[in-house]
Image (tube, rainbow, N blue to C red):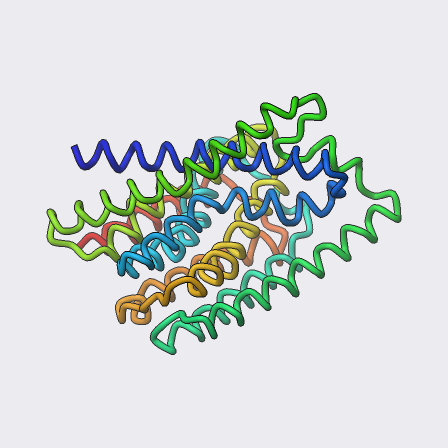
Amino acid sequence: MVWLTAALGLAVLLLAGDALVKGAVNLALRLGVPALIVSLTIVAFGTSAPELLISINAGLEGASGIALGNVVGSNTANVLMVLGIPALIAVMHTAEHDTRKSYWFMMAASVLFIGLAFRGVFDWIAGLVLLAALALILGDNFWDSVKHRRAGEAADAEEDLEGADPSMPWWKIILFLALGLIGLPFGADLLVDSATEIAQRFGVSDTVIGLTMVAVGTSLPELATTVSAALRRQADVALGNVIGSNMFNLLAIIGIASLIAPIEVDPSFLRFDLWVMLGASVLLAPFVLFKMNLTRVWGVVLSAAYVGYVLVVLS
């Protein structure tokens, strides 16, 4: 029964997160907020809402292993699984796109995160540092987007904005917001409680559950987006989705969660998991810096590496 409860919690989280994004995006556009601002803030935060609520809930309940494992495991899964599996389906021509600047931001965020982890706890000081770094990156992205729009290099952002529906009535906007705001904490509570009980039953730490079951579950939306992008030959979307998600996981999720409740760092993260996360990020270098395509061979390598990592963690 506890597995069903965990699955229900995950499903509620994912559906509530999607509802919150749709409601918030259309409310912001109705209130006259520019689509550019909406895409850089509301959509980005909204799609990370499930992970954020899990980390906050876990931190408040003293399950720091789930709070931190959710983020570290998700970042590792995003590179090895979320890019590996789609590459098995279709070759992604990443050589045609320039994501170098975002990649360096992600690597800087990873190094900063690991450095703060060696303090032994993510407290309000670490949270403010992470959120300050996020603000700098968002500011840079905003300025780049403004310059591109002025140069006429970008299409109307509102047309491609995730969840945007100009004809959506007010009652539906309010309904989506209500479902998101009610469903997210409910789903997070269900999933964290169930994950903790599973860890206790099988005699494993909540860190292991956070790095595997919870991390994979919260990476499913990114996997679905990347598979869809691979099938449509949109390699920039696939790569950008992973890089952006990883930055938000490190800076926004742990940054906000650590302001609400301190998150203890298990020594196992410092010995192994953080370095695997960093190594997975380094694996993106050939596709970002040296213009290599993400072929099926690489898909096999990345997917096999993730299976190996999970087996090591579970052992």
Residue furthest bottom in the image = 119
* Number of on-image labels: 0
Residue positioned 39% across, 57% down in the render:
72
Residue furthest right in the image = 151
**Relative to 204, does residue 12 appear above or below in the rendering?**
above
**Relative to 305, does residue 9 appear above or below in the rendering?**
above
**From the image, which quarter does the C terminus lie in?**
bottom left
The quadrant holding residue 144 is bottom right
Q: Nearer the viewer, residue 244 or 101?
A: 244
Left or right: 224, with 147 as reference point: left
Residue positioned 57% across, 30% down in the render:
174
**From the image, which quarter does the N terminus lie in?**
top left
Q: Nearer the viewer, residue 277 or 55?
A: 55
Left or right: 200, with 186 as reference point: left
Q: Residue 193: percent from the left, percent from the top?
A: 24, 46
Residue positioned 41% across, 48% down in the render:
53
Q: Nearer the viewer, residue 82 or 174?
A: 174
Q: Residue 96: percent from the left, percent from the top?
A: 68, 44
Left or right: 48, with 54 as reference point: right
Q: Nearer the viewer, residue 254 or 300?
A: 254
The quadrant holding residue 280 is bottom left
Q: Residue 295: percent from the left, percent from the top?
A: 51, 41
